[in-house]
Amino acid sequence: MFKPMAYVLIFAMIGVIILCFTYVPAISALILKPNKNEKKNVSSKIMKAVNRAYEPVIKFAMKRKMPVLLSTVVLFFSHFLFYKNGQRVSSSA
């Protein structure tokens, strides 16, 4: 009874993931181009601060690709090791 609904949910999630990694960045790059004569306002200052904080993290990750990739894989697979934590194993109570 719940299996078809679960399949629909999973396929919808996969479709949304594909959409958010392909279509949304392409369309936003076309639509959200910065203005040449941009005024200094609060949002531009916030975005500059975010970029200043984010750029060193990206440079660090790009210089050390293998450790970043390995830590990502380890974190992903550790979910499968500990997914039953906090669940009841037997119902003898």
Image (spheres, helix red, strand yellow):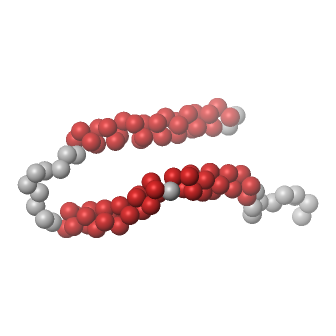
Find residue 76 and report its horizontal and vertical position in percent: 63, 52
- The reply to whether residue 5 is in sight is no
Q: Quadrant of residue 55?
A: bottom left
Q: Is residue 9 found left or right of 47 in the rendered image?
A: right
Q: Is residue 70 left or right of residue 47?
A: right
Is 92 in front, or is 17? 17
Number of numbered discs overlaid on the protein picture = 0
Closer-to-camera residue (4/24)? 24
Whether residue 89 can be seen here: yes
Q: Is residue 38 above or below residue 12?
A: below
Compared with 27, 67 (above or below) is below
Q: Decide if residue 23 is on the left or right side of residue 72.
A: left
> Where on the picture, by quarter, is residue 27?
top left
Q: Residue at x 74, y 55 (%)?
A: 81
Q: Quadrant of the N terminus?
A: top right
Residue at the image point whose x is 41% and y is 41% from the top: 20
Q: What residue occupies the far right of the structure in this picture?
A: 92
- Residue extending furthest toward the front: 63
Q: In this view, which residue lies farthest toward the left?
A: 37
Position of the C terminus, as image quadrant, is: bottom right
Instruction: From the viewer's perspective, tell me whether residue 52 is left or right of residue 13.
Output: left
Between residue 14 and residue 80, name the one nearer to us.
80
Q: Position of residue 68 (x, y in %)?
A: 54, 56
Which quadrant would residue 51 be assigned to in this image?
A: bottom left
Residue 42: x and y in percent read 19, 68
Picture residue at 42% right of the left edge, 62% below the top: 57
Residue at 20 percent of width and 62 percent of height:
44
Residue 43 on image: x %, y %: 22, 63
